[in-house]
Amino acid sequence: MPYYPHEFDTRASDLGMLDYSARPVMGASVEDLDPLELHRLRRMIEQLGGDRSLLALRDEELTGALVLTRRTNGIRVPTVAGLLLLANEGALAEHVPTHEVAFQVLDGSLVRVNDFYRMPLLRVYERVLEQFRARLHDDEVMVRFIRIPVPNYDESAFREAFVNALVHRDYTRLGAVHIRWEQDSIVVSNPGGFVEGVTLNNLLVTEPRARNPVLADVFKRIGLAERTGRGIDNMYRWWNRG
């Protein structure tokens, strides 16, 4: 089979030989980073119980500690992760054109909602979570003559699935992270398959392997991702509890 140059990064990422999210983006500059998104990052660290030691750092120190910027020839340059989290939309579209998130609500063959986002990841996360919460409702279950409200979907499991889709997608490929709210299920998908060594058969027992280690570490330190690397296990546990 032919092995094309545009496939090199994807294959190296699959094998764990390349962290694409840690790559400095030549042509981008720290001027492309939006101060409002940096403020959002700090606010989420505080609200979600993330690594509070980061809050004492100046902006330049913070982006360096999280590998959102790196020095190249003495100049601070945003990494792919830095652009995904902090860039303004124009710079994000120019330098990471593969990034896109879709939220769809399907009613049989009818499409009730069909929203596509190219915003920075933290803003997308908050927007999609708002849409999820707007569609939550409780079903009542009778237990010994006591009515117990049970939500139609578990928010913790949804958050974990969505964050996993953002963190572990292949950003070298075109395509969108899709959240499809169907009549009896929510389907979350992203571009890129499993990394080397992970299969459907060992998904719950294999050691965690991040496709984008820097991006995964940032989400954990913010408080958005599960810190032990057992997010999939917890999703199953939360679903079964419901």
Image (cartoon, rainbow, N blue to C red):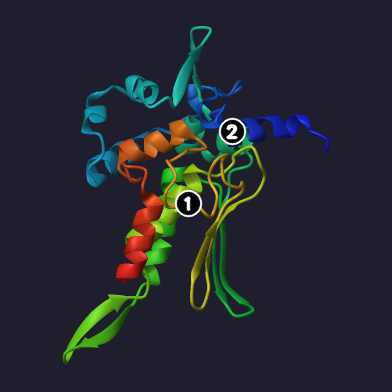
Residue 36 screen position, x and y as percent: 38, 37
- As drawn, is 101 to the left or to the right of 6? left
Q: What's the amino acid at mark 1?
A: Leu
Residue at 55%, 50% in the rendered image: 199
Q: Furthest residue to the bottom? A: 145
Residue under label 2: 15
* On-image quarter of the N terminus: top right
- As drawn, is 5 to the left or to the right of 119? right
Residue at 62%, 30% in the rendered image: 12
Residue 203 - label: 1
Picture quadrant where residue 142 is located? bottom left
Residue 138 screen position, x and y as percent: 30, 78
Residue 216 screen position, x and y as percent: 42, 38
* On-image quarter of the C terminus: bottom left
Residue at 53%, 45% in the rendered image: 198
Looking at the picture, tell me which residue is in the foreground, 202 or 149. Answer: 202
Q: Is residue 54 above or below residue 165?
A: above
